[in-house]
Amino acid sequence: LWADDPAEYHGVQVDFGPAHQNPKPIQLPHPPIHVGGVAPGGLRRAVAYGNGWIPIGGRTAVDGAHLARLRVDACAEVGRDPSEVEVSIYSAPAEAALLDDLTENGIERAVFNVPSLPRDEVLPLLDEYAELISGRV
C-alpha cells in the first residue's frame, strides 16, 4: 500500500484487490514498523519483521537490563544489530527510578497513561509527567 499505486496482495492469510492509499509516507522505504507482543514470541516477530518492539505491559517485566538482554539475544539469533530494533514501553509506571533504569539500558521510549478524566484532574497529572521527564529527553 505504501509503495505501489494501486497495490494488491493475494496470499493465504490476506487477500485484497487493487487499492489506493494516500497520502504516502515520506519515510523510505516505509515508516518504522513497531510490533507488539509478549516475549519471546512477540519479540522474535518484531526482530524478524519490524523496526521496534512494544512489550505487552504486565506480561513482560519492565526492567531495563532484562529488556535489553532480551533484545540482544533475539537479534543475535538472526544476526541483526540490536540498535536497529527500538523498544517502546507503553503504560509505563511514572517513576523516576524506572525511567533512569530504562535509559541506562538503552530502552528508547516510555509512554505514560493519560486517563479519560475531567480537565482539572488530567492537567495536574500532565504537569507531574512533564516534571518527571524534564532533563530526561
Image: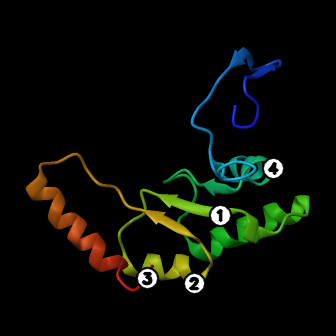
CA gap, disc 4 and disc 1: 13 Å
The percent coordinates of residue 20 (x first, y second) are 65, 23
**Location of residue 126 by image quarter:** bottom left
Q: Which residue is mark 1?
A: 86
Tag 3 secondary structure: loop
The percent coordinates of residue 18 (x first, y second) are 73, 16
Quadrant of the snapshot with the N terminus: top right
CA gap, disc 3 and disc 4: 30 Å
Of labels 3 and 1, earlier in sequence is 1
CA gap, disc 4 and disc 2: 25 Å
- Residue 73 position (above or below residue 99): above
Instruction: Report crowding for label 3: few under 14, some 14 to 19, many 20 or more residues within 10 A (C-alpha).
Output: few
| Marks 4 and 1 in Cβ contact (< 8 Å) | no
| Marks 4 and 2 in Cβ contact (< 8 Å) | no
Q: Which residue is mark 3?
A: 136
Of labels 4 and 2, earlier in sequence is 4
Residue 15's tag is none
Quadrant of the snapshot with the C terminus: bottom left
Q: Residue at x 54, y 76 (%)?
A: 102
Identify residue type, mark 3: Arg
Of labels 3 and 4, earlier in sequence is 4
CA gap, disc 2 and disc 1: 14 Å
CA gap, disc 3 and disc 1: 17 Å
Q: Which residue appears farthest toward the left when viewing the image?
A: 120
**Of residues 39 and 92, which is closer to you in this image?**
92
Q: Which residue is mark 4?
A: 48
Closer to the camera: disc 2 or disc 3? 3
Q: Residue at x 58, y 74 (%)?
A: 64
Identify residue type, mark 2: Glu
